[in-house]
Amino acid sequence: MKTLLIAASAIALSTPALAQMEPAAPATTPPATTMPAPAPQTAPAPAPAAPAAAAPAAPSDPKALIASEFPTYDKDGNGTLDKTEFAAWMTALKAKTDAKPTPAAEMAKWTDGAFATADKDKSKSLTLAELQTYLTAGA
């Protein structure tokens, strides 16, 4: 289940990045011409435009993916996830991977159990390391 969530979130996160990438321009060859070459310009030619920066690709390493998403769900910015922050993340992941919505009570029960399992030091918060260990245990 955890592997499925990680794989699905990696795919979901990479889809917008891939959609934003511009396709490569096809190579063209100039047509043959018999016209004389134009006279040299006196003003310097403008520099070619810089290529558009491609959107960063989603990390393929599950731990890197978790690390990149962790700050998004650490709403108070304290470097850990409390039960509410963790539940928001897991609910979002489950919504992306499940075709049928999970009832709220069932989801709350599942996230509470997952949080208790992931919180190895029983501090009532999850560090990035705890979350990475928990989510990649079956990978």
Image: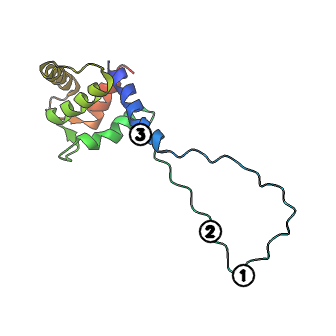
Q: Are marks 1 and 3 in contact (CB under 8 Å)?
A: no
Name the element at disc 2: loop
Q: CA distance from mark 1 to mark 3?
A: 45 Å
The amino acid at mark 3 is Pro
Is residue 62 something one can see in this rendering? no
Q: CA distance from mark 2 to mark 1?
A: 15 Å
Q: Which residue is mark 1?
A: 42
The amino acid at mark 2 is Ala
Q: Are marks 2 and 1 in contact (CB under 8 Å)?
A: no
Disc 2 packing (10 Å; few <14; some 14–19; many ≥20): few
Label of residue 47 in the image: 2
Q: Looking at the picture, how far across and down is residue 78, in whole percent?
A: 19, 46
> As drawn, is 126 to the left or to the right of 44?
left
Q: Residue at x 24, y 33 (%)?
A: 89
- Quarter of the picture holding the C terminus: top left
Residue at the right extreme, as displayed: 34
Q: Looking at the picture, how far across and down is residue 96, in whole percent?
A: 31, 27
Q: Earlier in the sequence, mark 3 or mark 2?
A: 3
Q: Residue at x 46, y 47 (%)?
A: 55
Residue at the bottom extreme, as displayed: 42
> As drawn, is 12 to the left or to the right of 103?
right
Pick whichever, 102 or 138, lies toward us: 102
Q: Earlier in the sequence, mark 1 or mark 3?
A: 3
Q: Which residue is mark 3?
A: 16
Looking at the rendered image, the disc whose residue lies closer to the viewer, 1 or 3, is 1
